[in-house]
């Protein structure tokens, strides 16, 4: 992966119901893209920090539980401010996404543009299917990102 | 000392969700309960009816921190069942992959989860913000070497997909290791400093006379192969595991607890590996252990943080040794012919012994799966540690007791589940 290219990171557990959302978005994008890099992650903070390091433009997609209707897609510009404290991303392993972003900010490894999309999930139990509203949001978010990066990407934004 | 209740509702820096309770009656600890919710039970059911070839990838999902361990125990057990002989060069590549996971897992636990206990911080973020950022950066850099091993050999950093029963889907070429070798050389220096950093901590003066259990190989520090041994004379093959160990359901926990068949508790993990296999560490790792003040036998579980750092250095050293001597195998995997059989294997996950048993049918389907993870096995020992270590602290401020309890639990790097990350502490004094 060339670090000058934008990176989309899909976070989650593909076997845990709606927690798979981020990874499904990543897989849709990875299936047909050459303009940007795509990675999947389980949300462990140090791995995320490794992925963020050296990049200038990163988009992170994760499942969340915020109390919004299932399938709602929330957007946060993490390079501007920390993720809201009342947002619970389901990707944690002791230390998770919010901590990874704050660590990266403190240690100077946060990309200039770091956007987090969080898809509201309903069920995160092992072995459960992804719910229909989340699947619909996965499709629309993947389409949005593909359009953003492929159509709307300017040379400045790319690097 | 009055009877009373201390409760902690949130304990971060452990892998998964759990709770524990300490009961104090008339100033004496009369009970400790460490309660966890254990994903492998789900996976055992999930595996039934699946093809044997799916086991490595399915079991890798049990834990985001140690997917390689689950893959390794599963492939070894299934190969034992089907009588598959794996080329030594493949075996060595598996060892290399395990080195990667040990580095990743140990560095994560030492720097991000456990070190804050010793340095007096709520978490790694506070620790870094208070002037320990250089140590955190060092750890992150060191961990990258582990990530790179898993990425080169496993196909990707998270949940490696290159592992299959019989070997690998694709074996790396010698040239694939060129960049990794450079990374590992840098990591070796970092790992030396990492050991020294952990050795600089203050350690509670607590020891117990444990039964240590780990694998032992005649000439390798144990990872994938060896007999299951203890410091009490146990020396058995993995296929005899269920004759000497049992899992028991206790009322206060969803998780099964591991005991010896005589009902005694035992300790598996870095401290057991070190005490039973110290002589098999690399020269560099052994020198670092001595420099760090580790004696031939270490009975203080708080010093497991040093042992993890020593094992990290060992894993870097061993990875370099393997890469330098690497010869490409003739085939990336051995052919596998299913048959009606039962197979068992144990490997050394970063947290300790990981036992798998499969009953398989001639069409390659999994009829039964049994997975005994290290955290299950360590639960009774954790409870005994809690009872032993806080007994003389009961008149101290509750924050101090709570802190020692949390630190004691984290000595074991418990890997509880993958969805949530809190542990409730309940100290009941009646």
Image (cartoon, grey):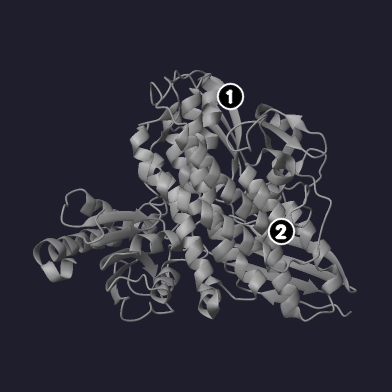
Asked if B415 appears above or below B179 in the picture, the reply is below
Q: Position of residue A31 (x, y in %)?
A: 20, 48
The answer to whether the residue labelled 2 contacts the one labelled 1, judged by CB atoms less than 8 Å apart, is no
Q: Nearer the viewer, residue A67 or B7?
A: B7
Left or right of residue B298: residue B127 = left
Q: CA distance from mark 2 to mark 1?
A: 38 Å
Left or right of residue B64: residue B175 = left
| Chain under disc 1 | B
Count residues near mark 1 (Cα–Cα under 10 Å), then give few for <14, some for 14-19, many for 20+: many
Asked if B229 appears above or below B273 in the picture, the reply is above
Q: Please tell me the numbered disc located at residue B342.
A: 1
**Quarter where residue B294 is shown:** bottom right
Q: Residue at x 72, y 55 (%)?
A: B251
Q: Is residue B155 visible?
A: no
Residue occupied by mark 2: B303
Q: Position of residue A65 (x, y in %)?
A: 40, 70
**Quarter where residue B20 is shown:** bottom right
């Amino acid at each position: 992966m060339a670090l000058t290219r934008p990176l989309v990171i899909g976070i989650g557990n593909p076997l845990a119901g709606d927690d798979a959302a981020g990874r499904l978005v990543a897989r849709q994008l990875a299936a047909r893209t050459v303009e940007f890099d795509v990675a999947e992650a389980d949300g462990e903070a140090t791995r995320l920090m490794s992925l963020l390091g050296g990049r200038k433009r990163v988009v992170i997609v994760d499942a969340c539980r915020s109390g919004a209707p299932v399938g709602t897609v929330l957007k946060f510009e993490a390079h501007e401010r920390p993720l809201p404290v009342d947002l619970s991303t389901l990707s944690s392993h002791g230390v998770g996404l919010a901590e990874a972003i704050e660590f990266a900010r403190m240690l100077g490894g946060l990309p200039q543009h770091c956007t987090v999309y969080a898809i509201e999930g309903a069920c995160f139990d092992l072995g459960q299917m992804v719910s229909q509203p989340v699947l619909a949001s996965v499709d629309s978010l993947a389409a949005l990102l593909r359009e953003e990066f492929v159509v709307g990407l300017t040379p400045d934004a790319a690097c | 000392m009055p009877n009373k209740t201390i409760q902690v509702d949130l304990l971060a820096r452990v892998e998964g969700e759990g709770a524990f309770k300490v009961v104090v009656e008339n100033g004496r600890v009369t009970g400790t309960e460490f309660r966890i919710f254990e994903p492998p039970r789900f996976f055992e059911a999930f595996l039934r009816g699946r093809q044997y070839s799916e086991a490595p990838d399915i079991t890798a999902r049990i834990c985001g921190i140690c997917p390689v361990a689950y893959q390794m125990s599963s492939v070894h057990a299934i190969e034992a069942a089907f009588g598959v002989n794996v080329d030594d060069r493949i075996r060595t590549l598996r060892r290399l992959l395990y080195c990667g996971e040990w580095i990743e897992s140990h560095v994560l636990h030492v720097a991000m989860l456990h070190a804050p206990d010793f340095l007096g911080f709520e978490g790694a973020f506070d620790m870094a913000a208070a002037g320990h950022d250089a140590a955190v950066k060092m750890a992150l850099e060191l961990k990258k070497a582990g990530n790179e091993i898993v990425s080169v050999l496993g196909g990707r950093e998270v949940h490696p997909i290159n592992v299959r029963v019989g070997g690998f889907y694709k074996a790396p070429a010698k040239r694939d290791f060129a960049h990794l070798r450079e990374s590992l050389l840098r990591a070796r220096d970092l790992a030396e400093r990492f050991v020294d950093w952990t050795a600089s901590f203050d350690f509670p003066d607590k020891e117990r006379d444990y039964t240590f259990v780990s694998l032992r190989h005649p000439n390798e520090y144990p990872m994938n192969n060896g007999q299951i041994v203890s410091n009490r004379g146990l020396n058995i093959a993995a296929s005899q595991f269920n004759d000497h160990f049992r899992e028991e359901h206790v009322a206060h926990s969803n998780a099964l607890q591991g005991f010896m068949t005589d009902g005694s508790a035992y300790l598996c993990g870095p401290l057991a590996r070190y005490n039973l296999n110290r002589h098999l560490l690399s020269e560099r790792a052994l020198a670092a252990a001595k420099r760090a003040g580790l004696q031939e036998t270490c009975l203080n579980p708080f010093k497991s943080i040093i042992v993890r750092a020593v094992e990290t250095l060992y894993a870097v050293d061993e990875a370099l040794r393997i890469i330098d001597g690497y010869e490409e195998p003739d085939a990336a995997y051995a052919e596998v012919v299913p048959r009606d059989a039962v197979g068992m294997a144990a490997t050394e996950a970063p947290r300790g012994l990981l036992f798998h048993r499969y009953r398989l049918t001639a069409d390659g389907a999994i009829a039964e799966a049994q997975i005994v993870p290290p955290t299950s096995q360590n639960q009774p020992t954790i409870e005994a540690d809690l009872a032993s270590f806080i007994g003389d602290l009961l008149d101290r401020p509750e924050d101090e007791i709570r802190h020692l309890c949390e630190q004691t639990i984290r000595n074991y790097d418990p890997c509880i589940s993958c969805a949530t990350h809190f542990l409730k502490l309940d100290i009941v004094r009646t």
